[in-house]
Amino acid sequence: MMPVFLDEISLMARAGNGGDGSVHFARRKYQPYAGPDGGDGGKGGDVLLVGDRGLDSLEHLRRFKAEAQPGAAGSGNLKIGAGGADCPVAVPLGTIAYQLPREFELGAVTAGGAELTLARGGRGGKGNPHYATGSRRTPKLAESGREGEELEALLRYRIYAESALIEPGLDHGALLLPRLLGRDYAAVDWPLYQARPRWARVKHDYNAYDVAYLPAELNDDGTLLVGYIEHAYWAQSLVINLLPLDELAEAAWPALAAELTELPLRRCEQIVVLADRPLFKPWQRENDGGQPVEIACLELTPADDSMAVFAAQLLGGTVS
């Protein structure tokens, strides 16, 4: 049975409290109070999101407790308490963190090993030497450690790739996925690729590119269902291959076009639709950064190489 694809989850993050400062005095012969020497408390641990290239969902966080350790209290002889251990939370590349309930964006993890601080540990308290003055040489007070941050975060995973490909998994010579994988149609594990979005590494002209494959399904009414179209969020170029639909593309396009006008796109520069007939006149919309996104339909004949067109988008080719 295919595991559930989990790309959004709420996570309670609790950073560690800071350790308390110490009230302590140096002990010397004939001088029981030789002066304050209580150490500061240690800092509490942080809760960190850490990018992991080996992950492709948030399923492993379903029962995860994101709690960092508190800092240790200070002690005599000006010994500073040990800092609390951080709590690393491994997430797939492309994960965005929002603070609930307002969904304020805290940041995103887009590289392997990259860290994003979700909740900061509390500062350690000051020991009693900080409170010594000329008139108060034996202070018997110290500062308590500060509380660590505690917040509820929404983690939203979107495949981090330079390009996204949407196409139906029909048995058709114009399919791009088998060519991207270097396999025949019959050799592709279609149930695997149609069940959820997949990340692929494509090599072209001595360069490697990350591609998000987003499966599409043709409904009985002729519309095209793209179950995970939101995973085009990070793509700089989005290619929609409607060539396998032939004349059905005209019926499938309007509903898909409506989705594209509302689709959140972080850094998209162009959307290219491949079809064997004109479906629309080019138009523009803006991505989340306020930059224009050109949307155009490229009419290809059976003699045209759709793979070469797709490679041109990977290389930053302009839409014509």
Image (cartoon, rainbow, N blue to C red):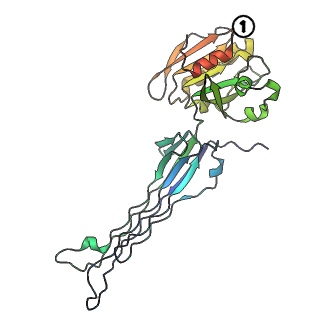
User: Image height check: is 105 above or below 117?
Assistant: above
Determine whether the residue tagged by mark 1 lies in a helix, strand or loop.
loop
Q: Which residue carries the number 1 mark?
A: 303
- The spot of residue 67 in percent (x, y) is 53, 60
The residue lying toward the viewer, choosing from 304 and 170, is 304
Q: Is residue 100 visible?
A: no
Q: Give the total number of marks visible in the rendering.
A: 1
Q: Quadrant of the N terminus?
A: top right
- The spot of residue 221 in percent (x, y) is 75, 21
- The spot of residue 199 in percent (x, y) is 65, 34
At horizontal 44% and vertical 59% (from top left) the residue drawn is: 121
Q: Is residue 22 visible?
A: yes
Query: Extreme front residue here?
Result: 206
Query: Extreme right residue here?
Result: 186
| Label 1 Cα crowd, 10 Å radius (few <14 / some 14-19 / many 20+) | few
The residue lying toward the viewer, choosing from 235 and 146, is 235
Asked which quadrant contains residue 298, the reply is top right
Q: Quadrant of the C terminus?
A: top right
User: Image height check: is 25 above or below 246?
Assistant: below
- The spot of residue 45 in percent (x, y) is 47, 60
At horizontal 19% and vertical 74% (from top left) the residue drawn is: 133
User: Image height check: is 176 above or below 142?
Assistant: above
- Which three-letter amino acid code belongs to the residue tagged 1? Ala
Asked which quadrant contains residue 79, the reply is bottom left
The residue lying toward the viewer, choosing from 97 and 33, is 33
Query: Extreme left residue here?
Result: 134
The residue lying toward the viewer, choosing from 229 and 299, is 299
Asked which quadrant contains residue 252, the reply is top right
User: Image height check: is 216 above or below 296?
Assistant: below
